[in-house]
Image (cartoon, rainbow, N blue to C red):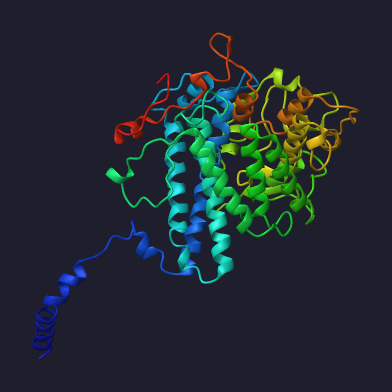
Amino acid sequence: MKKIIYGLLAACLVTSSLVSCNSKLDVQPIDNIDAATALQTSNDVQGTLIGAYTGLQSNQAYGGYIQLMSDLLADNGDQAFVGTFIPPQQIQRKTILKDNGFVESIWVRGYSTINRTNNVLGALDKLDTPAKKARVEGEAKFIRSLIFFDLVRLYARAWNDGTPASNDGIPLVLTPTPSNGPTSQVKRNSVAEVYAQIITDLLTAEAKMPAIQGPVNFNQFATKEAASALLARVYLQQGRFAEAAAAANRAIRGFTGVGGGLSPNYADNFTANSIGLGANTIEDIFSIQYSVQSGLNDLNTFYSATQRGDVEIQDQFYNLFEATDDRINAYESGADPYVTKYEGQYGNIKLFRLSEMLLTRAEANFRLGPASAVGATPLADINRIRDRAQLPALTSVTLPIILKERKLELAFEGFALGDLKRNRESTTDPATNAPLAWNSPRLVFPIPLREINANPNLTQNAGY
């Protein structure tokens, strides 16, 4: 009897499900969801914005590659890459091949993250309150602008090199790219167009994002002050000193107004991360957050003697410090000449610190002259930096003094290439020790070979 029942049940299952089987087998892939399907609710859009922050967190972005590779390209003998990876060696030697894997990774990760922000911006109507819509739009445009800015500085001629309106920049991709195809084969926009878009987006972000609520625990996400800080960095790169000073001043006033300030000791900005978990300080306007569950801090991987220790600091850098400069304690000398800023394996990476804004305001105000200065005087800002470094106060400043303080304060944090180019300085060819001019084609990354092969509309940079 049981066998008959089982047989009937099986027959029923077969006959009753013949029609439904076809629909059950029509399974949609779950590893690639269309944005129109994925972004249905306000929470969906906000979750996708978190994904854009995750793109920044990647070691191929601000988790290490962007800062380290730009510093290696600009290096004039302050550091030596002694590791076994070939791509960074090419970059420090200024002999980059078109198929350099690190150059390719920065480009691919950058545009992947840009596409995430474009998906967010294309779904703003899904947000359920005006306040959320404004904040999300501001944060997405801040993230997109940050990436565009560093990509155009790495893969295109500098703003002050020739004519920005006719120099090839990078593609401005401003709408979601659902898949590869003819519509994704975009051309390079001009350097001027890229900078104009960056500034437009940042002004929107600055207006729409909420102000920072306080230091340390409230700067995991971008705020109005982070947008002001990035604007100051962009304007300084362009030599627009009045706008740079004003933007830096806005960042300083907003941040210090809620309790932000310089950490008591320079090394405190970085040793707070050595406990293993990420930590912000009272000086961090915006940091990339890390933990044992999320992200990879490759600055720790490359710089720390407890990890690969691929970068060694050279004597000429140590010789820049005055005898009592406390900042030298962020480095080890002797047999193990390493940077100790990144000892925390999961330490947060600082992208905007108050000290950078003080230095930017000081430089911009100095170049403008007293009649056009905003905020504190250049002397006051530089002495504030020096006081924290346990150095005696100065009675006057010059531009070389300001630029030296900037170099020592921000060393090995990704500023070297941008500062070298905007100040029209030279670096050194490691093979010959001959000077290499700031506008040499060798100081510009190639457009990755895979991108050139896939997109016939992309032009290659000179020398490649």
In the rendered image, which quarter contains the C terminus?
top left
Q: Is residue 109 left or right of residue 352?
A: left
Tell me the residue at 12%/76% (across/down).
19
Looking at the image, is 14 positioned above or below residue 70? Answer: below
Q: Residue furthest bottom?
A: 1
List x then y, in percent, for residue 257: 79, 55
List x then y, in percent, for residue 93: 52, 18
In the rendered image, which quarter contains the N terminus?
bottom left
- The one nearer the camera, 260 or 130, is 130
Q: Is residue 48 left or right of residue 272?
A: left
Among the 4 quarters of the image, the one containing residue 320: top right
- The one nearer the camera, 9 or 255, is 255
Q: Is residue 26 left or right of residue 332?
A: left
Count of picture labels: 0
Among the 4 quarters of the image, the one containing residue 380: top right
List x then y, in percent, for residue 386: 83, 33
- The one nearer the camera, 394 or 186, is 186
State whether residue 59 appears in this view.
no
Tell me the residue at 67%/25% (across/down).
336
Tell me the residue at 53%/11% (across/down).
431
